[in-house]
Image: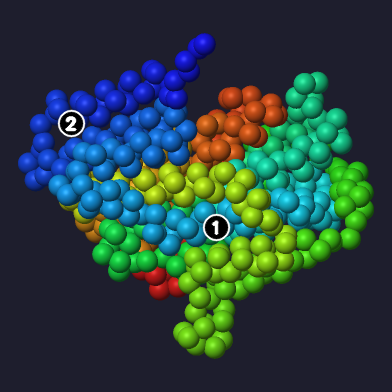
Amino acid sequence: MENKLGFKPIPAVIAIALALLIWFAIPVPEGVTPQAWHLLAMFVGVIAAIIGKAMPIGALSIVAIMLVAVTGVTSDNPGSAIQDALSSFSSSLIWLIGISIMISRGILKTGLGARIGYLFISLFGKKTLGIGYSLALSELILAPVTPSNTARGGGIIHPVMKAIASSYDSDPEKGTQGRIGRYLALVNYHSNPITSAMFITATAPNPLIVDIIAKATNSNIHLSWGTWALAMLLPGLAAMLLMPLVLYFVYPPEIKETPNAAQFAKERLNELGHMNRGEKIMLGIFALLLILWAGIPAMLLGDGWRVDATTTAFIGLSLLLLSGVLSWDDILKEKSAWDTITWFAALVMMATFLNKLGLITWFSSVLESNIQQLGLGWVGASTLLLLAYMYAHYMFASTTAHITAMMGAFYAAGIALGAPPMLFALIMAAASSLMMTLTHYATGTSPVIFGSGYTTLGEWWKAGFVMSVVDLLIFIFIGGIWWKVLGYW
């Protein structure tokens, strides 16, 4: 009987080789403790294994937790070492994203997501551009309570987009993708990074960014759900407004007028019938979550009515379970949520102890001193750091791996070089989602939509680079002015 390994040998060997090289072959730099250096070796090995997909990320995280506990890089005491290795499982941010993924299951199960998509298309779908805006608006409406950007863009919006394209006989297998499908697929995809930047709960790595920024500023900056949403509101809406237009000119659809699309969507809505009990409950809970996350009770009634963001997520999930919209079996089957909790806990733990052991401080000071020699001033220096950070995503197939590997050091270096901490935090947070635009492997949504065959590789990469520039400029200039008005810097 064939004995299959639980890992891919070549990526695993490369990851192990990198870890051993750093651990044994490269001398520990001055100012860095051996424990910090050894943890860095394991961290680099884990990130390399994630990039190379040596194992599923959850499985790699279990291995990482084991290694931190066994090697004792955080503590010589075995009991303390395993407590350190498991410490991030108590992080409220990690549970916020995990519970939110479970809640998003209700949007899929009840059919509320598809109904929202068809509703907007029935209203604005008489032109191809209108369908594009309908897809983008549907994505935006779902984003606050759908932390799996892959589930949102690939699982909810993409089937709606494909149904519309098929109704106009725009099919990659027939070579007719240029009719309408290519344009709609690109709008479907490029809505995803923008909405992911707009809410902490719109994509899984965002709470990690909150955690990194808080640690880098000794908790002087701790982005709440409401602060993040307000900060990203104006630049996010501006980007969503421009994106369908930009893609319309870059890759114009052959079919410009689509009167049948609105009728098609209306027929689908008729097939769905009136909102069922589950949809109504889901919609009510959706509204409740937004009210609590935005801090509206505290605004109206005082701080005594403030509800923590993670507590809010637990309230939403509890109501879905009590109402029967979701069953416990649904929650157990939501593998992506449990997977996310596991790998988040491992990566946050390693990043936390790299910071505690002084490695991030040391690396950011190296970056700072090298960039300082260029004499660029804080604007030029922070721009250089931002561009290097964002476009390094060409080398990553995981936003989480990229953020974990680079953001802490780059953010700390930017602050040390004089960038206003809140301004640089917000633009780095936005870039952490906008970098998803770049490639067909940038995030989980991209292979789903690219794999449908509506675009060639060249078309995808061209659209990705164009949109990365447009989105980044919007967030830098419109966002920068908006954040100034809000008094954030």
* Residue type highlighted by circle 1: Ile
The residue lying at 52 percent from left, 83 percent from top is 305
The residue lying at 87 percent from left, 36 percent from top is 167
Name the residue that disc number 2 marks. 23
Report the mark closest to the observer, 1 or 2: 1
Q: Residue furthest bottom?
A: 301
Q: Residue furthest left?
A: 30
- Residue 236, image quadrant: bottom right
Q: Position of residue 312 (x, y in %)?
A: 55, 69
Instruction: Tell me: residue 447, above or below residue 276.
Output: above
Decide: few, some or many residues near mark 2? Use Cα within 10 Å; few <14, some 14-19, many ≥20.
some
* Residue type highlighted by circle 2: Trp
The residue lying at 11 percent from left, 36 percent from top is 28
Helix or strand or loop: what does disc 2 sit on?
Answer: helix
Name the residue that disc number 1 marks. 99
User: On residue 210, which mark appears?
Assistant: none
Total numbered labels: 2
Decide: few, some or many residues near mark 1? Use Cα within 10 Å; few <14, some 14-19, many ≥20.
many
Q: Position of residue 3 (x, y in %)?
A: 47, 15
The residue lying at 39 percent from left, 40 percent from top is 61
Helix or strand or loop: what does disc 1 sit on?
Answer: helix
Q: Position of residue 460 (x, y in %)?
A: 59, 31
- Horizontal arrangement in the rendering, residue 135 relative to residue 62 (left or right): right
